[in-house]
Image (spheres, rainbow, N blue to C red):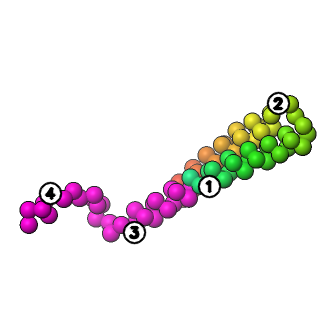
Amino acid sequence: MGNEDNKPNFNTDNDSGGQAYGNYAKYTGMAFQMMAIIGGSAFIGHKIDQWFDHKVQWVTAIACVFGVCLSIYQTIKQLKA
């Protein structure tokens, strides 16, 4: 009787928890997708630099910046949907 009143109510939006888990999965998936895009572009840039035997890794740097821009674009596109 008295203990029930002292428990914090973390579920303020009257949701049964299904939406919260759905949002968690959505945003976690977006984070992994961002890591995959940036990591993949960095890997490809690194392999191109190895192939051409560049002393300065310019292609890797440009590929990383391209990957970050692409992942931000993809994230914004998914958030609007």
The mark nearer the N terminus, 4 or 1, is 4
Q: Position of residue 56 (x, y in %)?
A: 82, 30
Task: Tell me if residue 80 can be seen.
Answer: no
> Where is residue 63 shown, x and y percent of the image?
75, 41
Is residue 32 shown in magenta? no
Question: Residue at 85% of width from left, 40% of height from top?
Answer: 49
What residue is shown with label 3? 18
Which residue appears at 80% of the width and 42% of the height? 46
The amino acid type of the residue labelled 4 equals Asn
Give x and y (percent) for residue 32.
Answer: 59, 55
Q: Identify the amino acid type marked 2.
A: Val
**How many circles with numbers are drawn on the protein?**
4
Nearer-the-camera pick, 23 or 38: 38
Q: Residue furthest top?
A: 56
Secondary structure, magenta segment, majority class: helix
How far separated are the C-alphas under marks 4 and 3? Answer: 25 Å
Circle nearer the N terminus (4, 3) = 4
Q: Nearer the viewer, mark 4 or mark 1?
A: 4
Position of 40 compared to 51: left or right? left
Name the quadrant of the N terminus: bottom left
Segment tinted magenta in the rendering:
1-30
Distance between mark 1 and mark 2 Cα atoms = 28 Å
> Which residue carries the number 2 mark?
56
Residue underneath mark 1: 33
Q: Closer to the N terminus: mark 3 or mark 1?
A: 3
Mark positioned earlier in the residue sequence (2 or 3): 3
Provide the secondary structure element on which disc 1 rests.
helix
Q: In the rendered structure, which amino acid carries the disc numbered 1?
A: Gln
Please provide percent x and percent y for residue 27: 51, 56
Q: Which residue is mark 4?
A: 6
Quarter that holds the C terminus: bottom right
